Image (cartoon, rainbow, N blue to C red):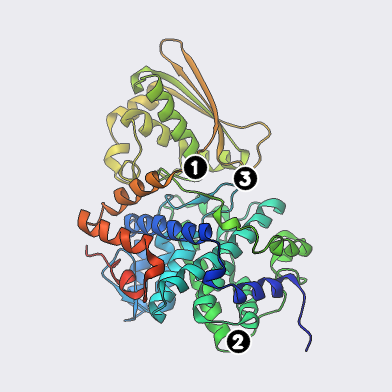
């Protein structure tokens, strides 16, 4: 039978053929950094109310198993571990996003490779390869969604399901045909609605990342057992892009520059435990306060312009990690914004924060000419002081260097681990490619309460 030439088949052939040694060195290093950052995020988020009920459920119904639940002294079956770890992966808004919107795949990809890798006893190199290839598929599909979507859909979960199918499928050793079946099966289970912002406990949004991991793992397992999915799911009528965008032809863009450019590297690691649209405003406010030696008492007004899509989110969702007004007030009063400032009520309930909100004006407006697509990291900020000074700054959220990422990891992991344990885990994560078996590393993430 002649080899099929459609983009989905081409994508799957590339995934199946690309080995660890074929990946550029900078891509392998990015994968290790992505794993490192995401594990720190998961340790800090593991017991938050956004994901704890999912953990409770899977330990009740999942039974005993070989797979760890990150941040908990618990194990369950592979499928349920993927669900729980995926929910933990986005239990908070501190996981990485993307420079052009192609982010949040770490929140489901890392839980997937950890769970499947532990179950199979995969090597560190196998895990890095699987992480890169699945993240690359997710990033490419997200880029297309962002480019063409006429309606607001939660791209990260929709494309994440297919990315996780690749993450799991690579570790399971699926060939190109089986990978295509896994993608077809995962596409049938892909979902994600931005109406999750109506639910202000962040539980629905976290669960969507868990479901992406669960669907991806299940799809890969089914494909390994010979279950068939529809072929050419990216371009077929009523397939993935036809269903979510109404333009099936755009699936061909998923293979443009394949193997030459890696979109999974277009990451924006987060400094703060808040949503992507809040990263630049917080950074800018702290810079303005530092450079001008301003205190909260000297601030009369903060004006922020954000992309139109971001505006709707940050002004309607009242979760502490999303609501921009309260985030800026806490930042101004405390002069910093850590994970605890967001998740420990005492910081938000500090009387000085309420007094600041009563006295100072925080004005959030849509940014002219900036749509949802790729503009969430661009903002304008103006601070007006009680002394009549006006300080204006336009910026795009600046990338974190490795030193900042390391400081972030140590702070997040330090919420649950002793210093010696943090350093030992750090060495394992950054040198993950040297591991003969990933299982001991994942087991070390079972943290006692």
Task: Left or right? Give the position of 409 relative to 33.
Answer: left
Gap between marks 2 and 3 measured at Cα? 37 Å
Q: Position of residue 278 (x, y in %)?
A: 48, 39
Query: Are there few (<14), some (14-19), or many (20+) residues within 10 Å of tag 2?
Result: some
Q: Quadrant of the C terminus?
A: bottom left
For mark 3, give the secondary structure: loop
Q: Is residue 154 visible?
A: no
Mark whose residue sits in front, 2 or 3: 3
Name the residue that disc number 1 marks: 399
Identify the secondary structure beneath mark 1: loop
Tell me, for residue 183, which label it has, or none.
none
Q: What residue do we see at 53% from left, 65% from top?
A: 132
* Relative horizontal placement of residue 55, taking residue 316 as reference (left or right): left
> Is mark 2 in CB contact (under 8 Å) with mark 3?
no
Q: Earlier in the sequence, mark 2 or mark 3?
A: 2
Q: Residue at x 50, y 81 (%)?
A: 172
Residue 320, image x and y in percent? 40, 43
Could you say whether the residue bearing mark 2 is in a helix, strand or loop? loop
- Circle nearer the N terminus (2, 1): 2
Indicate which disc residue 374 carries. 3
Taking depth in this image into account, of 344 and 437 the one nearest to the observer is: 437
Of the 4 image quadrants, the one containing the N terminus is bottom right
Q: Please give the residue where the numbered disc 2 appears in the rendered image.
A: 227
Q: Residues within 10 Å of mark 1 (few under 14, many from 20)?
A: few
Query: Which residue occupies the foreground of this view, 174 or 285?
Result: 174
């Amino acid at each position: 039978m002649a080899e099929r030439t459609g983009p989905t088949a081409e994508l799957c052939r590339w995934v199946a053929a690309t080995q660890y040694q074929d990946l550029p060195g900078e891509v392998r290093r990015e994968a290790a950094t992505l794993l490192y950052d995401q594990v720190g995020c998961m340790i800090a988020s593991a017991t938050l109310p956004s994901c704890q009920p999912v953990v409770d459920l899977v330990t009740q119904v999942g039974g005993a198993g070989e797979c760890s639940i990150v941040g908990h002294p618990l194990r369950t079956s592979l499928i349920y571990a993927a669900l729980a770890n995926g929910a933990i992966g986005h239990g908070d808004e501190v996981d990485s996003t993307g420079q052009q919107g192609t982010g949040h795949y770490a929140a489901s990809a890392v839980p997937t490779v950890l769970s499947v890798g532990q179950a199979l006893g995969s090597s560190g190199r196998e895990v890095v390869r699987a992480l890169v290839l699945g993240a690359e598929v997710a990033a490419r599909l997200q880029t297309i969604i962002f480019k063409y979507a006429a309606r607001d859909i939660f791209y990260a979960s929709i494309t994440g399901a297919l990315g996780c199918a690749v993450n799991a499928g690579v570790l399971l050793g699926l060939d190109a045909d089986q990978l295509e079946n896994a993608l077809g099966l995962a596409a049938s289970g892909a979902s994600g609605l931005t109406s999750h912002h109506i639910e202000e406990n962040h539980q629905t949004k976290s669960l969507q990342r868990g479901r992406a991991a669960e669907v991806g793992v299940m799809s890969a397992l089914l494909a390994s057992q010979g279950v068939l999915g529809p072929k050419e799911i990216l371009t077929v009528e009523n397939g993935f892009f036809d269903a979510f965008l109404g333009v099936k032809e755009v699936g061909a863009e998923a293979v443009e520059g394949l193997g030459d450019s890696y979109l999974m590297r277009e990451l924006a690691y987060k400094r703060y435990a808040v949503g992507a649209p809040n990263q630049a405003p917080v950074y800018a406010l702290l810079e303005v306060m530092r450079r001008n030696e301003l205190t909260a008492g000297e601030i009369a007004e903060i004006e922020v312009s954000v992309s139109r899509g971001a505006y709707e989110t940050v002004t309607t969702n009242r979760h502490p990690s999303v609501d921009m007004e309260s985030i800026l007030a806490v930042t101004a009063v405390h002069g910093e914004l850590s994970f605890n400032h967001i998740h420990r009520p005492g910081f938000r309930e500090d009387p000085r924060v309420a007094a600041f909100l009563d006295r100072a004006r925080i004005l959030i407006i849509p940014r002219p000419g900036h749509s949802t697509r790729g503009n969430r990291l661009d903002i304008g900020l103006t601070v007006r002081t009680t002394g009549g000074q006006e300080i204006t700054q336009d910026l795009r959220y600046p990338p974190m260097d490795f030193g900042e990422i390391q400081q972030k990891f140590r702070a997040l992991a330090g919420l649950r681990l002793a210093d010696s344990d943090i350093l030992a885990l750090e060495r394992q994560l950054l040198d993950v490619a040297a591991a003969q078996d990933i299982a001991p590393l994942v087991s070390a993430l079972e943290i006692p309460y």
